[in-house]
Amino acid sequence: MLIKAINHSLDELTNLLDQLSNQSYSHSCEALSNSSIGAHTRHILEMFQCLENSYDSGVLNYDNRERNKQIETETEFAKQFISAVKSGLKRENKIIYLEQMIDGLTFRIQSNYYRELLYNLEHCIHHQALIKVAVLQYDTILLNENFGVARSTIEYRNQCVQ
């Protein structure tokens, strides 16, 4: 179910990229503190990539991302990257150590692969909500009404309708 939800969010992102020119995708948006849709997309994808690249070693540090500018400037490249991310998701759950430096000190805490996938899903949805703000400037882009909406919020709304 988790992989299905991640694939759904990444498919929504692909659908958005299908509607954007490279110029619109990489254009800075004042509402995003002069960031771009592409920059947020890159950030989402590189977090997933970081998890995948860290799987074998079992030590994950999200600060050690590649930050590939091509992902944030070329929609076709970003869509290929999304496909690669999706193909690398299905792995066995295992213990992973999350590492991060805070105030010059390195912390390492125990997590697991599924927990980090869930984190990345929630992180993806959060950034999709930000992307949605940037998309409002384009009249021709169509997004699913639940783009950038947390799964729990969607469930709650569905319960309220009944």
Image: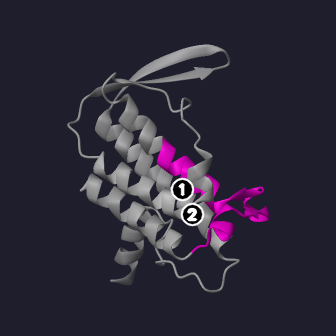
Residue 81 drawn at (x, y percent): 44, 53
Residue 22 is one of the magenta-drawn residues: yes
Q: Residue at x 79, y 63 (%)?
A: 30
Foreground of the two, 154 or 82: 82
Q: Which mark is residue 129?
A: 2
Foreground of the two, 103 or 12: 12
Foreground of the two, 132 or 29: 29
Q: Secondary structure at mark 1?
A: helix
Residue 129 is one of the magenta-drawn residues: no
**What residue is disc 1 on?**
126
Residue 31 drawn at (x, y percent): 75, 64
- In the picture shown, does residue 45 fall above or below 162? above
Residue 2 drawn at (x, y percent): 28, 53
The majority secondary structure of the magenta stretch comes to helix
Residue 92 drawn at (x, y percent): 20, 37
- In the picture shown, does residue 162 fall above or below 151? below
Residue placed farthest to the top in the image?
Answer: 105
Q: Are marks 2 and 1 in contact (CB under 8 Å)?
A: yes
Q: Amino acid at mark 1?
A: His
Magenta residues? 20-46
Q: Is residue 89 left or right of residue 107?
A: left
Residue 66 found in image quarter: top right
Residue 113 found in image quarter: top left
Q: Residue at x 29, y 51 (%)?
A: 87
Residue placed farthest to the bottom in the image?
Answer: 140
CA neighbours of label 2 inside 10 A, class few (<14), some (14 to 19), many (20+): some
Q: Secondary structure at mark 2?
A: helix
CA neighbours of label 1 inside 10 A, class few (<14), some (14 to 19), many (20+): some
